[in-house]
Image (tube, rainbow, N blue to C red):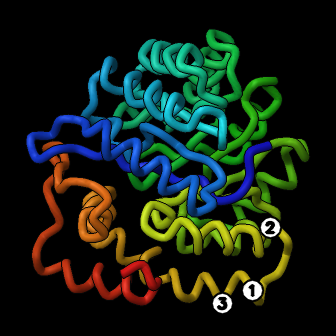
C-alpha cells in the first residue's frame, strides 16, 4: 500500500502554455530530495482538464521515466467519458505507472449505479491498481459510502482519495471496507485528522510547496503522534487554506514560480494569480518557512 505524503504535482508550463519538461524534471528531483512519498501526475492540480490525450500520456510517461522507480507514481486517468478514462488508464499502464487515480465523472452527473458501472468498466478493462477520487465540490457528483464499499470489492480498485474533508465519512469508509483498502485525504486542511483516524496519507497540494514538512507531518500522523503532527501542521495551515484563494492550481503555481521552481505559465481558462492575492499567499509561504 502506498502511504504518506503524495504530491498532486503541478504541470510546469512556459508562458505560452506549452509543457516545460526541464522544469518538470527539476520538480521531480525536488520532491525526491525532500522526502515526498509518491507523485500523482496529471490530476486536477496537473491541469489534466486542459491537456489533450497525447500531452496527458506524455507527462505521465516523462514523470515515470524521471522518477525511475525511486518512489511510486500514480497517474491521473479519470474522465467524464468512460471510454476516455479507459484509454488514459491504458496509457498510464503502458507508461509504467504504479497505480491510477480516477476522478468521478464530472458535469454529466451520473447516478450511484452509473458511478459503479463506470469504475467497474475501467477496472475490468485495464489491469492496474486503481484509486477512486471523490471531489464533489468540483465534479457536481458525490460518490456515497455505499458505492465506495461496492467498488472496493473489485480486486484492482485499491483505495479512494476522499476530498470532502468529512472525517465521519472517512471513518465510515475505513470501517466498512477491507483493511487493505487505502484511504487518502484529498483535503490538506483535514488531512492530519484523516490519518489520525486511520487514513493512509494525503494527496496534497501543499506538498508542492512544502514537501519536507508535509512528509514529516504524515510520518507523525501515521504513527499516531498527534502532538508532533499538530506542531508541523499548524505551520502549514496557512498553505492548506491560502493555496485555494483562487481555483487550484492558480495559487500553487504562483507560489512555485515565486520559489524559482517553475515558469509562470498556466493554461486558459485558468489565469495567473491576481495581484491582490500575492501577499496573502506569500505570508502563508513565510509561515511555512519555504521562503
- Rounded to the nearest whole Å, what is the CA distance between mark 2 and mark 1? 11 Å
Relative to 209, say whether 232 is above or below.
below
Residue visible at 55% across and 25% down in the picture: 114
- Residue 181 position within the rendered picture, expressed as x and y whole percent measured from the top left: 81, 42
Q: What residue sits right under mark 2 in the picture?
A: 222
Can you identify the residue that label 3 sits on? 231
At a point 45% along the width and 85% down the height, the residue shown is: 289
Query: Badge 1: few (under 14), some or many (20 or more) residues near its Cα, within 10 Å?
Result: some
Q: In which quarter of the image is residue 90?
A: top right
Q: Would residue 116 be found to the left or right of residue 237 on screen? A: right
User: Residue 165 at x, y = what percent?
Assistant: 58, 66
Looking at the rendered image, the quarter that the C terminus falls into is: bottom left
Mark 2 neighbour class, 10 Å CA radius: few under 14, some 14 to 19, many 20 or more = many
In the image, residue 125 above or below residue 35: above
Q: Considering depth in this image, is 225 or 120 the residue closer to the camera?
A: 225
- In this view, 50 is above or below 176: above
In the displayed orientation, state which residue is furthest to the right. Answer: 179
- Report helix, strand or loop for mark 3: helix
The residue identified by callout 1 is 228
Q: Residue 83 carries which label?
A: none
Residue at 60% across, 53% down: 6
Mark 1 touches mark 3? (CB < 8 Å):
yes
Q: Distance between the residues labelled 1 and 3?
A: 5 Å
Residue 253 x/y as whole percent: 28, 59
Query: Does any portion of residue 139 appear in the rendered image?
Result: no
Q: Is residue 20 or residue 191 the one in the foreground?
A: 20
Graded by Cα atoms within 10 Å as few (under 14), some (14 to 19) or many (20 or more), the crowding at tag 3 reads few
Q: Quadrant of residue 283?
A: bottom left
Amino acid at each position: 500500500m502506498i502511504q504518506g505524503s503524495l504530491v498532486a504535482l503541478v504541470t510546469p508550463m512556459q508562458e505560452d502554455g506549452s509543457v516545460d519538461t526541464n522544469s518538470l524534471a527539476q520538480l521531480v528531483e525536488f520532491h525526491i530530495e525532500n522526502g515526498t512519498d509518491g507523485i500523482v501526475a496529471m490530476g486536477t492540480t496537473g491541469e489534466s482538464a486542459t491537456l489533450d490525450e497525447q500531452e496527458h500520456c506524455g507527462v505521465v510517461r516523462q514523470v515515470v521515466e524521471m522518477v525511475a522507480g525511486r518512489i511510486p507514481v500514480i497517474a491521473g486517468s479519470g474522465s467524464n467519458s468512460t471510454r476516455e478514462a479507459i484509454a488514459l488508464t491504458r496509457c498510464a499502464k503502458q507508461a509504467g505507472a504504479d497505480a491510477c487515480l480516477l476522478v468521478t465523472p464530472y458535469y454529466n452527473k451520473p447516478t450511484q449505479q452509473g458511478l459503479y458501472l463506470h469504475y467497474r468498466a475501467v477496472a475490468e478493462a485495464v489491469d492496474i491498481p486503481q484509486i477512486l477520487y471523490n471531489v464533489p465540490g468540483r465534479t457536481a457528483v458525490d460518490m456515497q459510502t455505499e458505492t465506495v464499499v461496492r467498488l472496493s470489492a473489485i480486486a484492482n480498485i485499491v483505495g479512494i482519495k476522499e476530498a470532502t474533508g468529512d472525517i465521519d465519512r472517512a471513518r465510515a469508509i475505513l470501517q466498512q471496507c477491507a483493511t487493505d483498502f487505502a484511504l487518502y485525504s484529498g483535503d490538506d486542511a483535514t488531512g492530519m485528522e484523516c490519518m489520525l483516524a486511520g487514513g493512509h496519507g494525503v494527496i496534497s497540494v501543499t506538498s508542492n510547496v512544502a514537501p519536507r514538512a508535509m512528509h514529516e507531518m504524515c510520518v507523525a500522523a501515521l504513527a499516531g503522534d498527534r502532538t508532533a503532527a499538530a506542531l508541523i501542521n499548524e505551520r502549514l495551515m496557512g498553505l492548506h487554506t491560502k493555496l485555494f484563494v483562487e481555483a487550484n492550481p492558480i495559487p500553487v503555481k504562483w507560489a512555485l514560480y515565486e520559489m524559482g521552481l517553475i515558469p509562470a505559465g498556466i493554461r486558459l481558462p485558468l489565469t495567473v494569480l491576481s495581484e491582490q492575492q500575492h501577499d496573502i499567499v506569500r505570508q502563508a509561504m513565510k509561515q511555512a518557512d519555504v521562503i
